[in-house]
Image: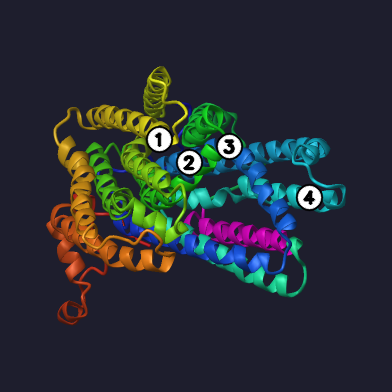
Amino acid sequence: MPQPTPTGPGHAAPGTATTGAFGRDMLFVVGSKLLYLISRLAVPPLVLAHVTLADYGLWTTCFILVSYIGMSASGFAVVYVRYVADYHARQDTAAISRLLSTGIFAMGAFAMLAMTGLWLAMPGLLTLFKVTPAARNTASVLWLGACAVFLLDASVGAFGYVLHGLQRIRNEQQIWICSYLFETVCIVGFLQAGLGVYGLLAAFGLRYAFSIAAAAVLVKRALPGLRLGWRQFDRSCLRIFFGFGTWVQCGGLVGTFLQSVDRVLAGMLIGPAAAAVMELAGKLPSTGASLASSVSMVALPAAARQGALGASHAVLVVYRDAVRITAMLALLMLPPMACLAPLVIAAWLGQRADASALATIMAWVAIGTHLHILSGPASSVFRGLGRISNEYIYHGLRLATLATAVGMLLANGHGQATTALAAALGSAGLVAATAYLAISHRALTGGLAGLPRLYLLPFAAPYLLGLAVMRLAALWPLAPNAGRATALAHLLPIGLLYAALASAASWRWLLTPAERAACLRRLPARQVKNPAASPLPAFAHEAAYQGNPGDKQ
């Protein structure tokens, strides 16, 4: 893979620099994402109290455009994280300067072209989305403004990705938390001031202006020798962005397609109503998966750093730690959604004619999503090592099993049944994920030893526990016409019971003795006896290699 010639003091000693905050970073990322999800739930009711549904629809449409533009910038983000981690491990600030300068100028040029194209395409987009003549000026301002803010962040906002690559994960997440809470406060103020839907755009812009400035300040403090400018522009970096970055971007496009293929197939084979049912049934599992998948973003720069140091053992421990933490988070959320799906649907949506179908689909989506999420750490480690081709194996497996499952479904005449389609897609996903996990584990460790303990037990055991809890819930059946409050009253105690049992199992079988001891030291009584104890669990690879003091945050 092309890269700027290292100009720093050279390689650090292999295995001597591991981020001691790795495990704590994982927990911090999950907590910040959970807070974000809670804050986002509060925004729509507030906005709809001051803005018409039509105007709010124009605002939400902005993010359809932003999502497609975002796909074009995804490769740049991974390049920054992977190569900044690599160069920082080599103590090569000059290479980071060249990478960042080249990326900012290249993405800036793309941003200008994209904005010009969007401006020229605006009349067609307004027609495509059937915007009324009276709302066209508002729509144009919102859409152009939101895309301009996003593209500004994609170019000069690269400092956030640099923090990520430096493994200043908590700094990056602290900025993110402050920025979206600041945006929420601005939304409240602007709506109260009568700015209407334009207040949402102003708050969006201020959020990113704050995050860009804050990240730039922290990067400059972390890398005093960083230099930016035309003189730092390096054409060899373009080969990284449009080589490695393009492969990442193409993989992201395939992944995005595969994430939405259930709704696409349901709409094509059955109709729009079936696509809506698939979308609805997948919302809660996707939310739970987003929390568990947060772990993978910490694994990528950690693996890149250890790979640059030649610390192959530390890479393996990063991989195993990331899988364990992902498994712990996933087993707390996805198995109860599958095993208690009828109760979850009744408590969430109330009694519906399609409740049974929704519950069946949710169960299949939760199970398939669970094993899919466990593949994230391996993919992130391979990205960190610069081996992007490995995830294309997964894409190929998913496409092959998907085509086989749908073909068999149609051949058996079940193509018009939404639940049958969900079962076919879920089964295909399980087969593909299982094969990919075996391939990846063997590529990383040199064999299949440890695969059942690392993946099979944390995946399968929670469903045995969930089935036992489901049998217990059946002793207290829900009345046919029960409301959402009654369903919630049934769900809460049984859900809490599952959470307690799953947490106890995780404590016993997923946490290491050192991690359990560190957790116990957080108890108030223990803290009094041993005030010098570590404030948060140390993870296995922290004991394997002592981190540099400068890496502590």
* 390 sits left or right of 324 in the view: right
Give the CA distance from mark 1 to mark 3: 15 Å
Which mark, by number, is residue 272? 3
Do the residues under discs 2 and 4 have CB atoms within 8 angstroms? no
Residue extending farthest front: 480
Q: Which image quarter holds the N terminus?
A: top left
Which mark, by number, is residue 139? 4
Q: Position of residue 302 (x, y in %)?
A: 35, 46
Do the residues under discs 1 and 3 have CB atoms within 8 angstroms? no
Give the CA distance from mark 4 to mark 1: 37 Å
Give the CA distance from mark 1 to mark 2: 8 Å
Q: Position of residue 358 (x, y in %)?
A: 42, 46
Q: Is residue 210 magenta?
A: yes
Give the CA distance from mark 3 to mark 2: 10 Å
Per the image, the residue denoted by label 1 is 422
Which mark, by number, is residue 278? 2
Of callouts 1 and 3, which one flags the residue occurring earlier in the amino acid sequence? 3
Which of the two marks, 3 or 4, is nearer to us in this view? 3
Q: Residues within 10 Å of mark 3 (few under 14, many from 20)?
A: some
Do the residues under discs 4 and 1 have CB atoms within 8 angstroms? no
> Which residue type carries mark 4?
Ala
Do the residues under discs 3 and 4 have CB atoms within 8 angstroms? no
The answer to whether any part of residue 220 appears in the image is yes
Quarter of image, res 357: top left
Q: Which residues are magenta?
A: 199-225
Quarter of image, res 182: bottom right
Of callouts 1 and 2, which one flags the residue occurring earlier in the amino acid sequence? 2
* 336 sits left or right of 201 in the view: left
Q: Which image quarter holds the C terminus?
A: bottom left
Quarter of image, res 180: bottom right
